[in-house]
Image (spheres, grey):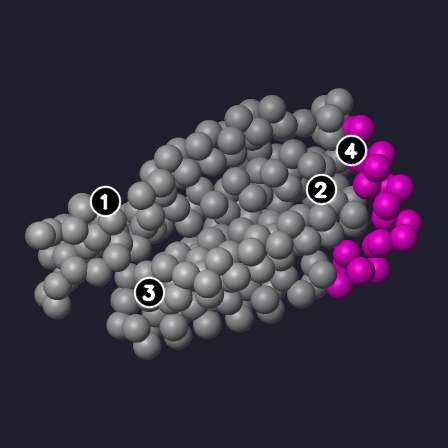
Amino acid sequence: MMPPAERRRGTPHGWSLALSPPLALVAGVATSFVVALLAALVWHTRWPNAVDAEMMRWQEAVRVQGDGIATAIAHAVGPLVVLAVLVGAALAWCAKRWDAVVLALVAAPGALVIELLLKQVVHRQRPEGADLLYPSGHVAVATAAAVTAVLVLRATLAPRRTRVRVAWLAGSLVVVIAAARLVQTVHYVTDVVGGAALGLAVTCWVALAITAGCRSGYS
């Protein structure tokens, strides 16, 4: 019997699990909507909204004790993402899942490029006119790398226990990175939420595009 179309893809060697999970389209649309909605709310603004302003008071209070640790975490994001990209690509390569190799190499860098472009378009700044804020690049790239790691393990048929553990670890790291950026007071909470949504959206759309390309190539 032919496997369900939404979960499997055809290859010259038979059928294997599709790169994009069944809910990738729903997640991509939903997170893209969140990114667009928050972008509209903070479009070309210099002053925080009521929620961001209230949260910033808490962030400034915590920064007194946690700024050193938060800064160290922020500096570790780049090396961690590069490591995740290389390990994911290597695992996919060993499993001969070339679609997963492409995802591992494209998703996180793609999230970085898009967040830099989005920062220029939205152009959210602080009252003093400092750096562009929306969305958080650290959180966007970390989220893209985390989701990619889970999808690569799924595509390479890693044991379920391994996938669950990696999912929890990757998700926890994203939360820690997001908290660190808030503690540093370099972002408002909407910037961080927008960054997480962007990272997830980019990864879902890349996975969907790769899966669609593979299906058309083998049809």
Q: Position of residue 135 (x, y in %)?
A: 59, 41
Give above or below for 17 relative to 85: above
What SS does tag 3 mark?
Answer: loop
Mark 1: amino acid = Glu
Q: Residue at x 46, y 63 (%)?
A: 161
What SS does tag 2 mark?
Answer: loop
Q: Which residue is mark 1?
A: 6
Q: CA distance from mark 4 to mark 2?
A: 10 Å
Q: Which residue is mark 2?
A: 187
Q: CA distance from mark 3 to mark 2?
A: 38 Å
Residue 138 visible in the picture: no
Q: Which residues are magenta?
A: 53-72
Q: Position of residue 96 (x, y in %)?
A: 26, 72
Q: Earlier in the sequence, mark 3 or mark 2?
A: 3
Give above or below for 140 relative to 155: above
Query: Which corner quadrant of the image does residue 134 belong to?
Result: top right
Q: Which residue is mark 4?
A: 55
What SS does tag 1 mark?
Answer: loop
Q: Residue at x 43, y 46 (%)?
A: 202
**Horizontal relation, residue 194 to residue 188: left or right:** left
Q: Specify few, some or many for label 3: CA neighbours under 10 Å numbering under 14, 14-19, or 20 or more.
A: few
Q: Specify few, some or many for label 1: CA neighbours under 10 Å numbering under 14, 14-19, or 20 or more.
A: few
Residue 160 included in the magenta stretch of the image: no
Nearer mark to the viewer, of 1 and 2: 1
